[in-house]
């Protein structure tokens, strides 16, 4: 809901807001430039009388002196019946040259106010400001939800480049943009008279001027009493009409002055509406307060980038969601399907289930688990299909589910289906956790929690039969996994290790096939070290995923593969000859990347886990401190990337290389090496170090235990580090 | 009756109740033509109005520029009309752009012509100058453009004339 409230106005008003923001930024910087060119005398240094005197000596027929919000002074006058305007030195009253208002500034101002389209444009600009206000508020709430509470609002953000850009810039610009939007709405409403602006009505002086001969302005007591910093505008008596006096507008109000006696005839102070309106204008333009103008200008500059990055995020999210035919609204469906998915493969099953239920005459609504509604008006049952991420964690589309379940006020029959891989210890751990949470809240179970192993279509069909019996509908779930769109790649290099220790391992490099036709792609798909590549072995329906050791900018796709006994994909890759082809696709893994900044990075891995870590080191061009802890079997057989790592250590990309080999006398595991280095590691963590762990599940568990012990004296725990994004794992 | 006709100097095309009571014989159609200089700023606000022989405000003929909050910049007119009770909705149009010409036709009672009354024009432009009484032209048959007289102002008005 909140996300929609953010993306809808964003999409509709993106261009409008971008145009308002760019012109607004121009005006902000324009006013800063104007301010930097103006001398502003200290309060008490110059009176309006002195300035008026100096100007009138030069131009007997001066019409008006205006002091702009930026502090520059402009006098308009007639000379030989020709109108003139000049800039005046506020200190001395001397001429600084003719005043020529910039046409560019005027045009940009009009673009900003009304897109040069009169009242219709004013309305459009006002709607743009309103949309911006909605975006600011909903954006701040989304940001808070994403980072975990207002207290965490300054934490580093995670995600893809566009997500980080959107978060970080949005956070930076939030206050400025909110202020601009809010005051912009106000000014638009004031333009149309909906809100009062308290414009002073310059009626004729209440007291008639004496009509005597005029004194020079320097001798007028009422002008001597006003400091220049208070002045807005001073209008001189017109022509030779002795009945006309001075009209003085100051920050406080408007008054008339007798040109003969120098007495203030009357004074109308600004009312509250005027004061509020002037404050709003000051806050909107930043004129006269250049640091505010700078803040507003910089904030405005981010708006087009925010719009662009936001559009990319929206498009990707949309493209990632599976297309479901006849998806019924949440409040009119009788059956709700909620999906917990990390890489969208579980969605494929949900689509099959949705189609089968719809065919059987049900009205079905499918949504991510994070979209659990507080109540469903017509739902009779809830079906949850969820994968498990990592070691029993929630997948991306289900992270908020438990929290939302706590707040849910509804209860209905539910069935949970877990997806996972039986070879992992926490097989479907999250599905079981969800089922337990639902039971605890008193939801009746339609079925026991079923588990689908390795996306097995048979398991899924069997569950469909059981579900059909439970709800009295015959369901035939024939699931055919959608094949992801792949790119053909060609093996270009292979370095083999581990033959001696019976652990054949290879570093494989792939490139685009050389002899591609005109229509074939010329560049690798975009990826970074730490992302995943899914490879489909010939005849296999399910891809295997490997962590990438290179970035697409390296021009090769590099992975580290250990041959698994009986492994279809690893076997296929190990048999592959140079020039042999694979079908591969990229799955971004933005959570497993070194955070930005200069803080040290502790890289920990074992075996083929070195792959992405070596990639991070290779790309450490800025030489931030990187400490590698890596475990292998024997230095002479499986020291993956041995020569490269020595080179990285020599050229400064790698600060320290720490290895542990298990099959040498006195050797050990990488977690032993960590325990031995506890003091140094504590020091690094205290300096803000980020820990990145890549490798098998057993090693990751050992490393986590070792780190918990290391952190204890610091009063820190892994959960804290994880929540700050400073302990990241890629486990397989 | 005269008073009503004089106060509401209307464009003949505008449907206004008062017009129904204005016998054609007692009023004359006057075309006012105001050409602005190419001063290059935002649209100018204009007030065209009548003053009596003593220079006292009499009635509004035409206002260009719809936002009432800027009307205070048409200073002489705004001060003068503070005593005028008639609404100006029907005789207010859009502001006049740089270098543009405003041509309007109004009905002026015969009793005011050649009787010492004067047509005055106040002009103002945002971030520019205010020109109260930029134009003052005697409302006489002799001064009408029939005799080829156009006056120019010191501010934004390149030429002003009226035809009866």
Image (cartoon, helix red, strand yellow):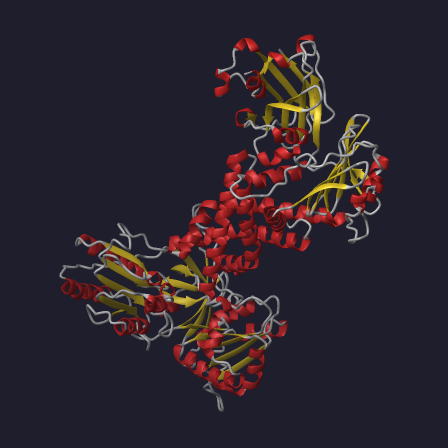
A348 and B158: which one is in front?
B158
Q: Is residue A675 left or right of residue A62?
A: left
Label tally: 0
Give the answer, above or below, for where A220 lies relative to A443. Answer: above
Tell me where residue B115 appears, x and y as whole percent.
Answer: 67, 13
The quadrant of the image that shows the N terminus of chain A is bottom left
Q: Residue at x 55, y 34 (%)?
A: A118
Residue A142 image offset from top left, x and y in percent:
45, 60
Q: Is residue A522 visible?
A: no
Q: Going by the image, does A453 lie left or right of A268?
A: left
| Quadrant holding the C terminus of chain A | bottom left
Which quarter of the picture shows residue A234?
top right
Query: In terms of depth relative to the viewer, which is nearer, A659 or A107?
Result: A107
Q: Position of residue A643 (x, y in %)?
A: 55, 74
- Image position, residue A157 (x, y; %): 50, 64
User: Residue at the right extreme?
Assistant: A57
- Which residue is depicted at the point 68% across and 26% down? B38
Q: Is residue A557 visible?
A: yes
Residue placed most toward the observer, A273 or A507: A273
Identify whether A196 is placed above or below A117.
below
Give above or below for A584 relative to A419: above
* Residue A172 picture quarter: bottom right
């Amino acid at each position: 809901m909140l996300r929609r409230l953010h993306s809808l106005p964003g999409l509709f008003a993106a261009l409008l807001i971008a145009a308002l923001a760019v012109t607004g930024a121009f005006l902000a910087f324009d006013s800063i430039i104007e301010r930097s060119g103006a001398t502003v005398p200290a309060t008490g240094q110059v009176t309006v009388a002195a300035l008026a005197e100096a100007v009138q000596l030069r131009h007997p027929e001066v019409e008006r002196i205006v002091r702009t919000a930026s502090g520059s002074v402009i006098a308009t006058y007639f000379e030989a019946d020709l109108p003139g305007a000049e800039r005046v030195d506020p200190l001395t009253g001397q001429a600084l040259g003719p005043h020529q208002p910039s046409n560019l500034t005027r045009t940009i101002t009009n673009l900003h106010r009304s897109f040069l389209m009169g009242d219709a444009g004013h309305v459009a600009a006002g709607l743009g400001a309103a949309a911006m206000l909605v975006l600011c508020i909903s954006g701040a709430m989304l940001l808070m939800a994403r980072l975990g509470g207002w207290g965490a609002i300054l934490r580093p953000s995670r995600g893809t480049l566009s997500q980080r850009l959107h978060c970080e810039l949005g956070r930076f610009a939030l206050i400025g943009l909110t202020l601009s939007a809010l005051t912009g709405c106000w000014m638009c409403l004031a333009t149309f008279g909906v809100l009062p602006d308290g414009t002073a009505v310059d009626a004729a002086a209440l007291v008639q001027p004496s009509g005597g001969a005029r004194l020079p302005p320097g001798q007028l007591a009422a002008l001597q009493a006003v400091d220049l910093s208070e002045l807005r505008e001073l209008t001189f008596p017109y022509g030779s009409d002795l009945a006309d006096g001075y009209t003085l507008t100051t920050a406080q109000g408007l008054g008339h002055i007798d040109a003969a006696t120098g007495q203030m005839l009357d004074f109308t102070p600004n009312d509250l509406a005027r004061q509020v309106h002037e404050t709003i204008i000051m806050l909107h333009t930043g004129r006269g307060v250049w640091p505010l103008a700078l803040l507003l200008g910089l904030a405005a500059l981010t708006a087009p980038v925010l719009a662009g990055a936001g559009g990319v995020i929206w498009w990707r999210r949309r493209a990632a969601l599976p297309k479901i035919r006849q998806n019924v609204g949440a409040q009119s469906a009788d059956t709700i399907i909620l999906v917990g998915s990390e890489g969208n493969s579980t969605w494929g099953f949900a689509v099959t289930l949705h189609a089968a239920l719809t065919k059987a005459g049900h009205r079905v609504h499918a949504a991510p688990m994070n979209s659990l509604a507080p109540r469903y008006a017509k739902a009779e049952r809830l079906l949850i299909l969820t994968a498990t991420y990592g070691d029993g964690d929630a997948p991306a589309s289900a992270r908020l589910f438990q929290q939302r379940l706590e707040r849910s006020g509804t209860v209905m029959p539910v069935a949970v289906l877990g997806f996972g891989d039986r070879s992992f210890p926490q097989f479907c751990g999250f599905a079981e956790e969800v089922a337990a949470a639902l039971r605890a809240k008193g939801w009746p179970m339609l079925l026991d929690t079923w588990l689908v192993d390795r996306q097995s279509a048979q398991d899924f069909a069997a569950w469909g039969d059981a579900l059909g019996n439970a709800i009295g509908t015959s369901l035939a779930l024939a699931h055919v996994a959608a094949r992801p769109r792949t790119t053909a790649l060609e093996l270009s290099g292979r370095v083999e290790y581990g033959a001696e220790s019976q652990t054949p391992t290879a570093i494989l490099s792939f490139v685009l096939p050389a002899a591609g036709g005109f229509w074939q792609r010329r560049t690798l798909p975009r990826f970074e070290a730490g992302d995943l590549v899914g490879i489909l072995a010939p005849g296999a329906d399910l891809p295997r995923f490997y962590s990438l050791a290179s970035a697409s900018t390296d021009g090769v796709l590099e992975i580290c593969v250990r041959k698994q006994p009986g492994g279809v994909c690893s076997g296929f890759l190990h048999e592959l000859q140079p020039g042999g082809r694979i079908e591969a696709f990229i799955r971004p893994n933005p959570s497993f990347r070194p955070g930005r900044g200069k803080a040290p990075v502790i890289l920990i891995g074992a075996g083929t886990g070195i792959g992405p870590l070596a990639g991070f080191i290779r790309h450490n061009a800025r030489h931030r401190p990187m400490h590698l802890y890596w475990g292998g079997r024997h230095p002479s057989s499986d020291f993956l990337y041995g020569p490269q790592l020595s080179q990285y250590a020599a050229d400064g990309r790698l600060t320290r290389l720490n290895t542990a080999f298990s099959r040498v006398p006195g050797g050990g595991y990488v977690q032993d090496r960590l325990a031995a280095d506890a003091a140094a590691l504590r020091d690094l963590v205290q300096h803000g170090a980020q820990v990145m762990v890549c490798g098998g599940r057993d090693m990751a568990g050992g490393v986590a235990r070792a780190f918990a012990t290391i952190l204890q004296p610091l009063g820190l725990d892994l959960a804290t580090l994880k929540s700050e994004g400073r302990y990241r794992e890629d486990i397989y | 009756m005269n008073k009503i006709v004089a106060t509401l100097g209307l464009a003949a095309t505008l449907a206004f109740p008062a017009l129904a009571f204005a016998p054609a014989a007692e009023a004359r159609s006057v075309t006012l033509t105001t050409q602005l200089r190419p001063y290059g700023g935002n649209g100018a606000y204009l007030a065209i109005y009548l003053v009596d022989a003593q220079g006292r405000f009499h009635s509004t003929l035409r206002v260009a520029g719809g936002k009432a909050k800027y009307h205070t910049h048409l200073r002489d007119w705004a001060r003068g009309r503070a005593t005028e009770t008639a609404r100006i909705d029907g005789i207010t149009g859009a502001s006049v752009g740089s270098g543009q010409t405003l041509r309007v036709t109004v009905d002026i009672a015969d009793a005011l012509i050649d009787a010492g009354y004067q047509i005055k024009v106040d002009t103002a432009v945002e971030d520019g100058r205010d020109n109260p009484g930029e134009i003052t032209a005697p409302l006489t048959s002799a001064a009408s453009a029939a005799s080829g007289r156009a006056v120019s102002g010191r501010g934004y008005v390149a030429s002003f004339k009226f035809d009866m």
